[in-house]
Image (tube, grey):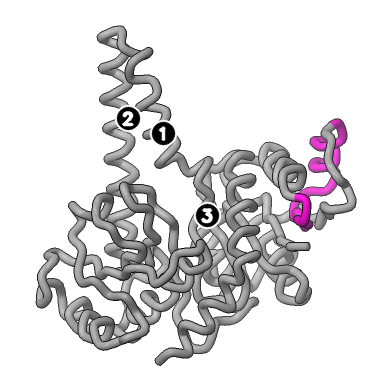
Amino acid sequence: MIKLVVDLMGADNKPKDLIKGAIDAINDIDDLYLYVCGPEDELLNEIKDLNYDNKRIEIVNCNEAITNYDKPVKAFKTKPNSSLIKGLTLAKENDEIKGFVSCGSTGAILVSSTFILGRIGKVRPALSPILGGLHPFCLVDCGANSDVRVDELYDFAKMGKAYMEAYGKENPKIALLSNGSEEGKGNDLVKECYKLLKEDSNLNFIGNVEGKNLLTLDVDVVVCDGFSGNIALKTIEGTAGVIAKFLLDYAKNNNMMKELGPVLYELKNTYDYNTKGGAVMLGVNKLVMKGHGAGVSETIYALVKQAYQLAKNNLIEKIKENLKND
């Protein structure tokens, strides 16, 4: 039985609008048990008419949330009864719980999971989503650390390798995000990390990757600092949105919805955060997943399914093993 904690507070939508995603996950996965953090009366009222196995879900009553308006460190210290803190504390204290998922504040999740769950060794936690292109890959880091040292960027590569191994990818290909594909391109950080990655026989390092090739190059892990990674991520999201709007407008204006409808559906499905889960907080002692703040019940469902798969495939153990290879 895989046990996970689901935080339903702190996101843009209300807990009662998200709970169905947890119920759908329970109904879809036979060996899943969920602890759901949120206002008990509200959630019970919302699910009272739904069919589900109530022996595999437990509501952890929480009436306080940490939001994007809270300063992460202050919120961690002053809101011990919030769903985020109670959920992470439950995950830490119960060895049977394998992970925690939330659509709450990124900063608060980073700070709270680091303090409560603790870091793996001295590694710096990083956020990593799976991005869909011609060859899906994980981006490490997408926004947790704007400034990093060379050794921390090196650790990101090792954690990214473990992440893709947990998805069944053998000997994943690793690249550094840079302003040119040639060796010697990039800032001092990238150049120094390039040397470390090239010399590591445990890593399948293929060199630099430019932004224009992110979605086309056959690579499994793209390593970068959180500042560059966040820009890359949001540029991809924004570009996909513009292309989708262009195609939709063109189809409508030229009576071609029948012909272009399937293309629009595939494009939306490839880049829709509501169906693709979220980013993993790599580097803490239990699996932590962050979904989009504007997520809906489908987002919670996708997050739980992704967390379940990664827990089943021993992501944390794989990260620890990869980080030993210094």
**Residue at 52% of width from left, 84% of height from top?**
321
Q: Nearer the viewer, residue 135 or 118?
A: 135
Label 3 sits on what residue type? Asn
Whether tag 2 and tag 1 are in contact, CB under 8 A, the answer is: yes
Check disc 1: other Cα within 10 Å, few if <14, some if 14-19, many if 20+.
some
In-image side of 76 versus 225 (left or right): right
Q: Disc 3 designates what residue?
A: 68
Check disc 2: other Cα within 10 Å, few if <14, some if 14-19, many if 20+.
some
Q: What whole-number distance in Å separates the C-alpha atoms at marks 2 and 3?
A: 29 Å
**Residue at 53% of width from left, 83% of height from top?**
320
- Residue range (magenta): 30-49
Whether tag 2 and tag 3 are in contact, CB under 8 A, the answer is: no
Q: Position of residue 322 (x, y in %)?
A: 47, 82
Q: Earlier in the sequence, mark 2 or mark 3?
A: 3
Q: Position of residue 63 (x, y in %)?
A: 76, 53
Quadrant of the drawing holding the C terminus:
bottom left
Q: Is residue 38 magenta?
A: yes
Q: Quick check: 105 above or below 152?
A: above
Q: Earlier in the sequence, mark 2 or mark 1?
A: 2
Q: Disc 2 designates what residue?
A: 244
Quadrant of the drawing holding the N terminus:
bottom right
Check disc 3: other Cα within 10 Å, few if <14, some if 14-19, many if 20+.
some
* Image quadrant where residue 78 sits: bottom right
